[in-house]
Image (cartoon, helix red, strand yellow):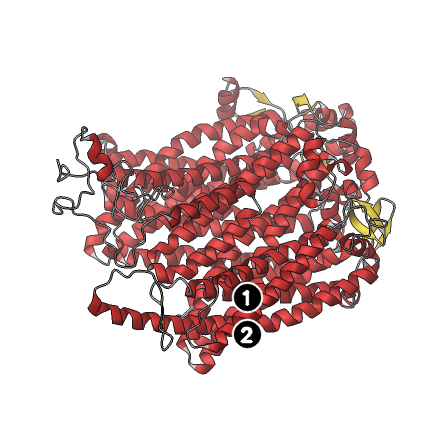
Amino acid sequence: MTALGIYIHAFFLILVLGLAPLVLLLEFLGIRKKDSDYMRGAKIISQLWAVSFAFGAVTGTFVEFGLYLLWPGTILAISSFWFIPFIFDLFSFMIEVAFLVAYLHFWGRSINQWLHWGLGWGIMIGSMFSGVAILAANSWLQTPWGTGNLVHQILPWVPTLGPNEVNSTAFSTISETAANTGVLNLANTGAANSLGFLLFNPLIVLLSPNSIVTTVHTILGAIIVACFETAAVFSYNYLRGGKVSQKPFYLKIMKSAYGFGGVAMFAQAFAGDQMARIVYAFQRLQFISFEGISPKGGIDPPIGLLLYGNPFHYFRGFDYYNSLASNSSQPSVVLQSVSFAQQSEPLLHFLYYTMVISGSILLILGISYFGLYVKRIDSLVRFVTRLPTERFLIYTSFLAPILALAAGGSGWAIREIGRHPWTVYGLIQYPQVVTSVSITAQFSVLIMAIEVVLLVGGLLALYFIPTRALEKGEEELVVIRG
Amino acid sequence: MVIPILLSFPLGVQASSFTPTAWLGFLLLGFGILIHITLVNIVLGMSIIVPLTEYIAYKGKDTEMERLARRLFRYLALSDLVAGVFGTFVAVILAGFWPKLLYVFSTIFFGPLMISLIGIFASIPSIAIYWYGWERLPKRVHLGTGALMGLGALLVPAGFRVLFAFIDNPYSFGVFVSGSSVAGGINASTVLTNPIYITLLLHSWFGGLTMASLFAAGAFGWALKSKSIWRETGNNFRSREVSIKEKEGEEEEEEEEKVEILRETRYMKYLLRMGLVFLTIQTVLGVAYFFVLEKYVPYVYAAITGNVSIAAYDFEWVLVPFLGLVFLIWASAVYLFVISRRSRFAKPSRPACLILMLSTVGALPLGEAMNDASRAPYMILTGTAGLSANDFTNTAIPVTWPIAYAALFVGIFTISALLITLYVVFVQGSRRFSPERSALNSSLSFFFLSFLSFLSLPSSLLGFLLRLGKLIVAKAIDQVVVHHPCCLHVGVAYCRTHESKSPFDQLFAHCVGFRSSRWDFFDAFPSILLRLASNEPPDE
């Protein structure tokens, strides 16, 4: 129920994050080249942007309520290690709304077009900042930076996680709390107050290396998904027929979106490598699971080469990490963690290679885009596919968003499933933060039905609104004032 | 400690009673709730009034009433947008600053919160479908969507007001409060028979209906008086404002205006009639709530009646102006209603309209602030004492006074930026209609957003300055030319040369120095095209 809600929320957020740079690029090209096609494309895509924002906000409200009601332990999280990210996110959201309203309202009205473009930057900066804050919050669950050696004492393979900025006694007390108490029964204010400060430096959450890499990797992923989805929409309209005079417009926007997404893939390949290194450094069990290392250990030449420069580097398996239980302050927890990782290995392995293969194909598609400008690449594309580059891009623009969504969805699934059974890795487990109120199956079905209705509503809006705009044709030409 | 005490003065609360976290949390939560509740009351009221009006229009085949419903619906959508933003604000502030209170709500009041959630998710898509479905859906389906929208709006306070009633008197719900802990559960019968909850809920529902109807009535009245040509048959009354129309077109223009005046007078009467009915019920409920407070929430009753032997702070200074505003609402609404009944061409008094709008919008947050803040320094009341607010605040992270102040200023700045932008967009945006038609949009937006801005002082100052700047701008009536083919208009020196040097004196004469803004200093983006001239000015 929670996972479905978060994924649906994330679907719209990806579009908000990813469409922003594309809209600004098209508007820039439109102003600079005085090209009404680019301006029209930017305007139509900005409507998608606005719809995604609206549905993102609605689904976000739903997720927020869900977290408070079903996972009241998140309340403790928000009041401590999530405090700064959520407050930053809140104010970024308000700034975003302000700029978005102004941007949409002043489009095509009597305003300097560069100023209008600047308003778009305001939205993008607000949404990026919001993304940074929320991803920092999630990253802290993966790698609780600022806990020093606290996690290492429980899970011996985890290195020191930054300086010690937490109340170790309080966290140890929390980690030993029984399940379903909503984290120490916050209703008993005396018990909660007796813990004292949990975090001495709330800003430490933003400084996690996991947070920085995750933010870059996620934002690039959002751009890629959004750009390829946009390319698919315009390719569809190009192939569908209709007014011949509109075809150059569809093609122009499709190429711009495809190119932007393709270029982002190059950076994403690098970001993905960095992400894997972070996981290897701080969440070794997850790494072993998705790489499919044998329980007794073994070699993985490509990874060994990337990480150590040695294709024959020996990676330890689950058996080794089980043996570390004797070094832990909570041996049963070590065994539990290793057991979870082993059980989820087949799934994580599948998801990981789905992500990697999808990403690799997208990288190839990104390279093929340059066939529009580089003859050798065009020749190669024609040789392999028997199609000119332009045609190739049109047809593959339908495959690309599917691959992008598969890669992104798989990546997030690995991240969240790989963290099991921990909510905060090494410190707080899921049963400690879930509600004590029993949830019936009917209730779960009702909530999931509402979530699906919201998704369907959002998809319909995303389809109808630009379709209407595109059908208006040349009447929607945007006059450029600047 | 002087500064926090001074800044807390508006609440009548001594900051020294609170930790920095509690003080900051109290202010941010109070601020957010006041704006949020003001807006959701507009939404609640309009969610009932708009479909009701559409139904009346449908039954009577009355296109004018249909038009009214559509115009009012725009303000519902605007209010819902901003209310949603502040709803998120309140939720995050609760979790960040009042985690223990939120935890109590999420466990003990799981059911009521789910009811509110269902209400929110019934009303939001209903609003969207209602918007896009107008003239696209069959009328009965559209009205059904409107009914769902109204039902959703009613469900939201039905859930949330349980929480407010709980913090007034938890024992009335059978919830055990002892020392520093709150434990127990509720059931439907304890909620539905709870006198505090029932009175508060009804008061909230009718408060929203009253506020929405009377505020809109006042706005229509204000807009009526802004007609540039106004004439009443038989009394030889004429507005002094000057028309720039040709004489032969003037009569046609005046006929159109007469029709418009008739229509908007009718709207105003309709809303006033409705509003007075709701106001009557609301006043009765208000009196009932006052007696409920006396019996079940003695601490709040003592605070608002100035009995400081029981309450820590005297909130009588809030009750008196609140009652004053209620009186002003009655007086102005009745006065306008009587005036509007005298003639088909209503000539409403602008001061009365202003008083009605401001007092309507002002009474609600004042009443809410009185109800919520008067419990200080407690959060949950237990008769004449309670559990301290400090016990429910965030104790997990250190918040010092400098951090609290910095956070408060950042919060006010951000909220101000949002409200100013909405003000500029929705007041400026009304310029795409003719000034007469824009008057309603302008006045509704202006007063509403200015009031919200007033809650945030920086934006209120800027907002009023922006409005003041408009008063010295020459006003065009209609059909203003905005594109200037500069190369053709030799005698109209609006353009500037493409060359870099121009006669200094000419710049002012050609308004280039102000980018053709024509003394509209505050309007950086006027309604004329800003571009470089292709020719030299004609005088050079």
Three-letter code, disc 1: Leu
Residue A264 vs residue A293, the one in the foreground: A264
Q: Chain of mark 2?
A: B
Instruction: Say which element carries label 2.
Output: helix
Image quadrant containing the C terminus of chain B: top left
Residue B214 is marked as 1
Instruction: Please check whether the numbered discs 1 and 2 fall on a single chain.
Output: yes
The image quarter in which residue A396 lies: top left
State left or right for residue A457 relative to residue B205. Answer: left
Three-letter code, disc 2: Arg
Residue B422 is marked as none
Crowding at label 2, few (<14), some or many (≥20) Cα neighbours within 10 Å? some
Q: Is residue B279 above or below residue A306?
A: below
Farthest front residue in view: B236
**Residue at (45% x, 36% y) in the render:** A125
Q: Please tell me which of labels 1 and 2 falls first in the chain.
A: 1
Q: Are marks 1 and 2 in contact (CB under 8 Å)?
A: no
Residue B273 is marked as 2
Instruction: Work out whether residue A97 can be spotted.
Output: no
Q: Is residue B150 above or below residue A225?
A: below
